[in-house]
Amino acid sequence: MTEASVEKFKSLSPSEFFYRNKEIAGFSNPARALYQTVRELVENALDATDSHHILPDIKVIIKNEVETPTSGLVGLSEAFEGGLYSVQVEDNGIGLPPSHVPRAFGQLLYSSKYVLRQTRGMFGLGAKMAVLYGQITTGKPAEITTSQVTSKRVYYYRIGIDVINNTPIIHEAATYMKTNDWHGTIVKIYLVGDWQRSKQKIYEYLKRTAIIAPYANIYFEDPDGEIMLFKRSTEEMPPPPREVQPHPYGVDLEMLKMMAATTKASTLVEFLYKEFQSVGITTANEIVQRSGLRPDLKPSDLTLEDLMKVLKAIKETNVKPPRADHLSNLGEKLIEIGLKESLKPEFVKAVTRKPSVYEGHAFIVEAGIAYGGRIPPSDKDFIPLLRYANKIPLLYDEAADVMRAVVRNIDWERYDVVFPAPLVVLIHICSTKVPYKGVGKEAVADVPEVEREMELAVKEAARELKSYLNMKAREREEAEKAVTIAKYIPNVSRSLSRIVGKVSEEVLARELLNMLNKRLTSFKIKNLSDVFVGVE
Ligand code: ADP
Ligand code: MG
């Protein structure tokens, strides 16, 4: 055997895997990494606030850091294209228990969100990828300051990642007594980034976050010293998401095996109705009967063969669809507020669809349409589309997203939209399992059930737009007639006054104008002023 034919085998830790494949989590170059860092930290900040019914106050500061001989970072930005930056995100959320901080920020795939609950985070990667990227490009650890709501202390950590072993490195740990009732988390990460190339995306990301979270205050200070404040426009928040049990249609053999091994239930029937949503005693018995197994079997004694029988029986049984009351969608009112505040349109309509299901996962689709006002016109192929999944704005990979396909396939002319049109479409999907195309969470996959719901939602909003446009056309026509008639009023009232006598020309003219005005002010649409240009 020659030397060259000997293959070397080894296994990678999750850290090393993502270290080698940073781009799949969105950290592909300094510009993208700066954007992704902001995004991951802001999403964690929002999860720590609105998911726990706290009105979010979020502060994002990106600074251009100076490379100094003492920082040991001289020449770094030459080694990596880009400059040295720090990203700091502060929230007023629930904070972290100190014992979990090192792993939450220093061990990949460590998360409090691996449960069936709708959150922005779901992979247990985001914060760590930012820490890892910062460490790779600057050698600096992340700084975390945190305090829980009930805690009397503030905890401060400097955390890095041991890439080979996927374990946190604690560079520093300190704690102080609290002097006020502050609670929340501040995360600061040093990294090589590229502000010029990510500036537009970061602003767009924050703007879109403000649309979908109109109840949040978001303060942003950029490296040029510009300050932008996205102020909350409502104190109303969607209900916080709740954790749910899995639906039987959503489990596979492996999951069933894990659940059976760890359940506290002592019999198969009990296991089914205690561990799954939508399964009552009757349904549980039905499933067991169909499987041909004994109802009093101990779940941990079930063989692989038994489990396959159970799984088959589940698929053959009519189980109630998954519950969706644990999903935290935004609701029509909040979407309309968000669109109105940010786009200043003349028309806005949002639609929240009833919950639906794909592969045993409940999901809700919402859509919004904003039209006219300050929205610039666009061509049919470039209708601005605001994409969201679990309240996260999606900015990249739009062409690959099923949402773009949905908007493209709608026959807008049927809804009386004439292009170029001042139109913006928003689509939001909420689910405990959003079918993302990758761990960077940038595009939603084309699952038929999801696509259909999106289409129905947009069409429903579009129908409202159509009736608005029709009404506008009718009223405009009437207004134009009124303008024509108004021109005759002086002549008509003069003649009338002469024929009838008694009433003066002025009184008649005033009366006729009043009647016209009354009709015009009763219009639903108030911005027909362009019709009256040049008319007294
Ligand atoms: P994910 O958000 O997918 O769970 P992350 O790596 O982004 O993964 O975060 C890991 C965990 O750290 C979270 O699940 C959460 O428990 C905790 N965490 C991160 N940031 C915050 C924060 N700002 N406030 C409270 N907890 C946080
Ligand atoms: Mg996260």
Image: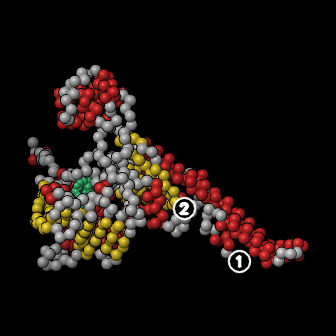
Q: Which residue is mark 2?
A: 347
Asked which quadrant contains residue 231, the reply is bottom left
Of 169 and 511, which appears nearest the observer?
A: 511
Q: Is residue 414 left or right of residue 4?
A: right
Of 70 and 363, which appears nearest the observer?
A: 363
Q: Give the mark count.
A: 2
Q: Which residue is mark 1?
A: 536
82 to 132, vertically: above or below: below
* Ligand 1 lies in quarter: bottom left
Q: Is mark 1 within 8 Å of ligand 1?
A: no
Residue at the location (82% across, 77% down)? Answer: 505
Residue at the location (13% across, 68% down)? Answer: 176
Disc 1 residue type (three-letter): Glu
Of 201 and 215, which appears nearest the observer?
A: 215
Label 1 Cα neighbours within 10 Å, binned few <14 / some 14-19 / many ≥20: few
Tell me which numbered mark, 1 or 2, is placed earlier along the sequence: 2
Asked which quadrant contains residue 144, the reply is bottom left
